[in-house]
Amino acid sequence: DVRMTQSPSSLSASVGDRVTITCQASQDIKNYLNWYQQKPGKAPKLLIYDASNLETGVPSRFSGSGSRTDFTFTINSLQPEDIATYYCQQYNNLPITFGQGTRLEIK
Amino acid sequence: EVQLVESGGGLVQPGGSLRLSCAASGFTFYNYAMNWVRQPPGKGLEWVSAISGYGGSTFYADSVRGRFTISRDNSKNTLFLQMNFLGAEDTAIYYCARSRDGYSFDYWGQGTLVPVSS
C-alpha cells in the first residue's frame, strides 16, 4: 500500500497568514494526489485534484503543487472559515490511501 | 443538484450484519463509479470499497475483503454496502462518495454512523 505522510499533524495560524501542509508518498504516485477539507461534523470536500487543479467553486487562496512523492498544499491569507482538518489522498494505486490529516486552528 | 443520502446505519452487535444504502440523485448514476469511505469517530479517513458504473468491477480494502460486498442498482440510483462479521474495528461513519476521473471524490453523502458494540 502507498503510505501517505502528512505534516504537520496540527498547526495554529493567524487570520491572513500563509499556511503550508506537506504530504509525502511512500512511492511515486505521479500527480494522482487530491486534497480535501473536512469541517467538524461534515463530510470531506474536494479542494484540489491531480495535485494542482482547483476544484470548481473553491476560492483561489487554496493551491497545490508537487509530483511523484512530494506535494504541498497552501492557503494564502487564511480566513476564519478555513478552520478544518485537511487530508491528502493518492489514487495512483489501489487501495486508495489518505494522509492522517492536518488539523488547522486559528491563533 | 447532486445529492447522496446514506441510510441503514445503527448499533450492531459484534459478529452481526448490516446493509447500508446510498440514494443518488442529480446526475446520471450509471456513468460514475461509486465508493464507500469510512471514518472512525475522531480519526482519519479510510477508503473501503469501489464499484464501477455498471457494477462489473468491484474493489475492496484488505481490512474488509471477504466480509463486505459493494453493489448497486442503477435502475433505482442506489449504492449498497453489505457488511457481515462486523467487529469493533468497523465502528465508523460510513460515507458514500462519487468518483470522478479515477478516484477523485467530488461528491459525498452526509454519512451514516455504524457503532459495533455489545
Image (cartoon, coloured by chain):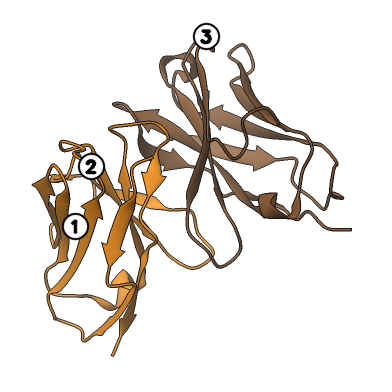
Image height of A41 relative to A30, above or below: below
Query: What is the quadrant of residue B88 in the picture?
Result: bottom right
Name the disc covering residue A27, or none: 2
Name the disc covering residue A84, or none: none
Image height of A79 relative to A37, above or below: below
Image height of B61 relative to B74, above or below: below
Residue A101 image position (x, y, % from top left): 37, 63
Q: Mark 3: which secondary structure?
A: loop
Q: Chain of mark 2?
A: A
Number of the front mark, 2 or 3: 2
Q: Chain of mark 3?
A: B
User: Residue, x 26% and y 48% (percent of image)?
Assistant: A26
What chain is the brown one?
B
**Looking at the rendering, in which quadrant would you find the N terminus of chain B?**
top left
Residue B73 vs residue B53: left or right? right
Front one among B110 and A102 = A102
